Amino acid sequence: MSQVLELVRRDPVLAAATVLAVASCALVPPDAGYLAYVDVRTLGLLFCLMATMAGLSRAGVFQAAGRALVARLRSGTSVVMGLVLLPFLASMLVTNDVSLIAFVPFALLVLRMLGIADASVFTVVMMTVAANLGSMLTPIGNPQNLYLYSASGMGVGEFVGLMLPYALLSAVLLVACVLAYGAHRRGLPVRRGDHDLPAADGLEPGRVRRRAVAPWAALFLLSLLAVARVLPVPALLAIVVAVALVADRGALLEVDYGLLLTFVAFFVFVGNVGRVGAVDSLLSSLVSGNELLASVAASQVVSNVPAALLLSGFSSAWPALIVGTNIGGLGTLIASMASLISYKQVIAEGAGTAGAYLLRFTVVNVAFLAALVGLAVTLG
């Protein structure tokens, strides 16, 4: 029993998805139809992208990029601005989760070294919002985008065009918030002296393991081709596994298999519910025409990835689902599971209290959510 409780504590979303999947099996006993539930293409792409990002991270790419950026900034405000825009831009290509895992610990270290550790809570909150908002621009920015992009049959250009207005407004709001905070803090004067940042994982500052980067960079390019439907996903999967086994097996261990299992569980649940006519009709009628607000609301409770998986089973209004689950990642701490990454790191590092972080996080998120929902309603 204790082991079960530990599994629930470690991954409550997977636990909830599993319970729903198992319960739905009582409505539709397992049969050959289950095989059609699972979107194998999405799972394959997600696995390949996670393995590739883990390989690049282990090669020191993201830490080196962060050091290179901060080394060119002088004022406290410019440092915070750089730290916030870094995950905003990076998440478009390396996902919101990866950008926060890579850059939040780095940001906390930088702020301590510059003597402005009291800006940690604000900076990490803004970095978290930035990662979630930057990731919405591309099909590979976050898991729900990858799934909805694949399910909708959209082209890359069409997807980016849909989300571009929201990304542009987000960038303006992020810059404005940081500038206002810097002005309030009188420019955030930094401690003068040696600002060289220590190396991580045995790397010299600003250096990467170049030989280790090459295969992962190649895999990333191949992944983009697969996303664009140029390269078959089974071929990409075989190449990624083969290269990882030779280049760095540890990258395979850092793949979030819990997320993959969560997808499978929700696929089963949605598939089973869809085969129960009365339930399917009821849920479809509730969601139909309200996809945007339903996506935002559902994301606040179950987070945006499960919301995308659930609601897509009852509506094919793909643009509204894509916009809704992306901006729905704002709001509560669990609206986007990536937000928990930052929260846990701030608390673990003692960079702020849980109450202070949650208060500022909620205020900022609700403000951004209101602005983006307003834009969505305006654009129709």
Image (cartoon, helix red, strand yellow):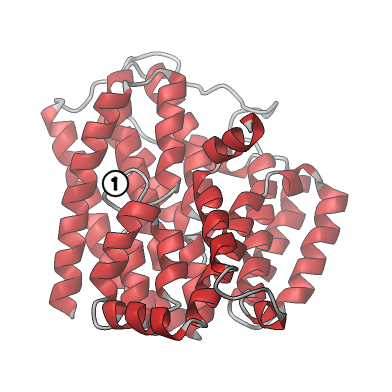
Image quarter (top left, top right, bottom left or bottom right) of the N terminus: top right
Q: Residue at x 14, y 66 (%)?
A: 374
Q: Nearer the viewer, residue 126 or 210?
A: 126
**Picture residue at 66% right of the left edge, 47% below the top:** 54
53 vs 324, left or right, is right
- Above or below: residue 204 compared with residue 283: above
Residue 140 pos. (x, y %): 52, 65
Identified by mark 1, the residue type is Thr
Q: Position of residue 73 (x, y in %)?
A: 36, 34
Q: Which residue is label 1 attached to? A: 332
Image position of 13 with respect to 217: above or below: above
Packing grade of label 1 (10 A; few <14, some 14-19, many >=20) is some
Up-down relation of residue 141 to residue 245 (above or below): below
Label 1 residue SS: loop
Instruction: Name the residue rendered at 21%, 56% in the picture.
Output: 369
Position in image of residue 238 (x %, y %):
82, 68
